[in-house]
Image: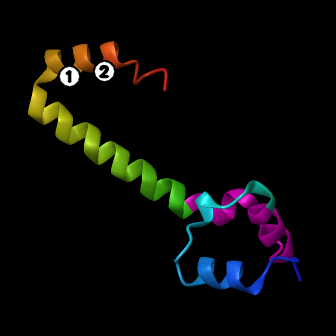
Amino acid sequence: MCKISYTTINDIYNQRTELTHCLAKIVYKIAKALDLTVEYLIEDTLRCDFELFKSNVCYKLKELTDINFIVEVLESNQVRI
């Protein structure tokens, strides 16, 4: 229906390939075939990535103390990234 190989669809379905690592055109074709938005398809994955990021930041903050954490973040340019 979306003109994507069975292997690709099967790998995504069986979680051998993450949807967020696929080309945008593949995600778009899948979303269109399922009558969904791209955002809806990748929403849970993005939320999971953010939760992991947030957890890592909290851990680093506890490890370094407030001032040292702020200095490291500013020096590493993480806010811009």
Q: Which mark is residue 46?
A: none
Say if mark 2 contacts mark 1, CB within 8 Å. Answer: yes
Comparing 71 with 10, the one in front is 10
Q: Which mark is residue 69?
A: 1
**Relative side of 29 to 51, left or right:** right
Q: Which residue is drawn at the image coordinates 18% and 41% (left, top)? A: 59
Q: Is residue 60 magenta?
A: no
Q: Residue under circle 2? A: 73
Instruction: Give residue 80's position: percent from left, percent from top.
Output: 49, 20
Q: Which residue is drawn at the image coordinates 49% and 26% (left, top)? A: 81
Q: Which residues are magenta?
A: 26-43
**Relative side of 58 to 47, left or right:** left
Instruction: Give residue 21's position: percent from left, percent from top.
Output: 60, 59
At mark 1, the secondary structure is helix
Chief secondary structure of the magenta portion = helix
Dot 1, crowdedness within 10 Å: few (<14), some or many (≥20)?
some
Rendered position, 3 above or below 81: below
Q: Quadrant of the N terminus?
A: bottom right
- Name the image colouring: rainbow
Comparing 10 with 57, the one in front is 10
Comparing 5 with 73, the one in front is 5
Rendered position, 10 above or below 2: below
Q: Which residue is drawn at the image coordinates 80% and 77% (left, top)? A: 34
Q: Which residue is drawn at the image coordinates 15% and 21% (left, top)? A: 66
Q: Is residue 29 magenta?
A: yes
Q: CA distance from mark 2 to mark 1?
A: 6 Å
Instruction: Give residue 77's position: percent from left, percent from top.
Output: 40, 18
Dot 2, crowdedness within 10 Å: few (<14), some or many (≥20)?
some
Instruction: Give residue 11's position: percent from left, percent from top.
Output: 60, 80
At mark 2, the secondary structure is helix
